[in-house]
Image (cartoon, grey):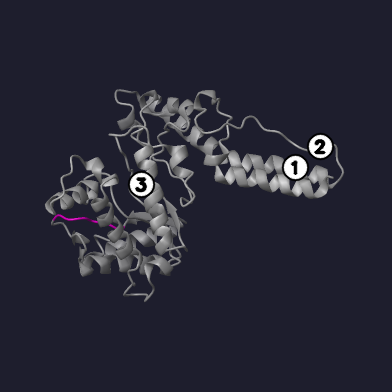
Amino acid sequence: MYMASNPGDRSKVLATLDQASHVGATVIRTWAFNDGGSNRPLQITPGVYSEDVFLGLDFVIAEAKKRGLYLILSLANNWGDFGGKKQYVQWAKDQGHNLGSEDDFFTDRHTQNLYMNHIKRVLTRVNNFTGVAYKDEPTIFAWELMNEPRVPSDLSGKTMQAWVALMSSYVKSIDDKHMVEIGLEGFYGDSSPERKRFNPGGSYSAGTDFIGNNRIPTVDFATIHSYPDQWVPGSTSEQQVEFMKKWLASHTEDAARDDYFRLVYDAIYASVKGGGPCAGALFWQVLAPGMESWADGYEVVLERSSTTAALVSQECARIGKITP
């Protein structure tokens, strides 16, 4: 967007998209924000936008579309680069609101409204090159709520949980055609305390909860980031590689649970339907919210696992139709 906002730099955008297409890439992630400051901001002040920069984003979407590329568009930044939550908090202060820290971005209603106004402005933007509103544009693969959101002032993850629930549902209220993801780095929180051992330092959550935050029904898929050179300071390259292996393996395991259940249930259903010897299945273990101390890595909290609960319900229903 930044480069494309200057017609003289658009050749660089085209070259990058051509390279992506040439290597066979299908999805690209880029910013749909640049808040405040003097370096080609998209949102100059709250609700005031640069048409030149918006035209740059229009151009990126239109040119990606020509090449069959899809875009994940991020709507804000946790960090100070390109404005971030710090800029939103400063805007709120400038408007007379008494905020104490950058983390107030996630809880202060006025600051939330400023961010929600940005969401609405971007999603309802009509592309000058294609004539299609962003919310209706098939080239947009998904919306990202924020690049690497963190709430270090509330390590329980509850503040993040409430913010994600609010903002993801707001995006869906405007645009029910596209997927939404949070932008998380992947730190485990209180909903899976046994997984915290995989976090940097063996426990640090950054105020996020990979399992809990991504189970919100209006979140469609999860993301993880990895910067072992920063997260494991003083470590050797070998130790960083080991961290990366465990980081990927643990998150892949988390994401694969439903696939595993589906695999087992399909086999059992085939047996039952064909009159075979396998007639049903039990899994270990169902827990209720608040029983985290019983967690052993195999637990399923159905109230927090809507997709897994749906799979179990489906299996019970189709087995029930066959057996007396």
From the image, tell me which residue sits under label 1: 267
Q: What's under tag 3, amino acid-wise?
A: Trp
Element marked by disc 1? helix
Where does the magenta region start and end?
32-37
Residue contact between numbered discs 1 and 2, judged by CB atoms under 8 Å:
yes
Element marked by disc 3? helix
* Mark drawn on residue 79: none
Q: Position of residue 236 (x, y in %)?
A: 34, 23
Q: Give the position of the C terminus as an image quadrant.
A: top right
Q: What's under tag 2, amino acid-wise?
A: Cys
Q: Position of residue 172 (x, y in %)?
A: 43, 59
Residue 42 lies in quadrant = bottom left
In this rendering, position of residue 307 left or right of residue 72 = right
From the image, tell me which residue sits under label 3: 163
Residue 316 lies in quadrant = top right
Q: CA distance from mark 1 to mark 2?
A: 9 Å
Residue 182 seen in this snapshot: no
From the image, tell me which residue sits under label 2: 278
Q: What's under tag 1, amino acid-wise?
A: Ala
Q: Nearer the viewer, residue 296 or 159?
A: 159
The correct choice, above or below, for 194 with respect to 311 in the image is: above
**Magenta stretch containing residue 195, yes or no?**
no
Of tags 1 and 2, the one toward the viewer is 2
Q: Earlier in the sequence, mark 3 or mark 1?
A: 3
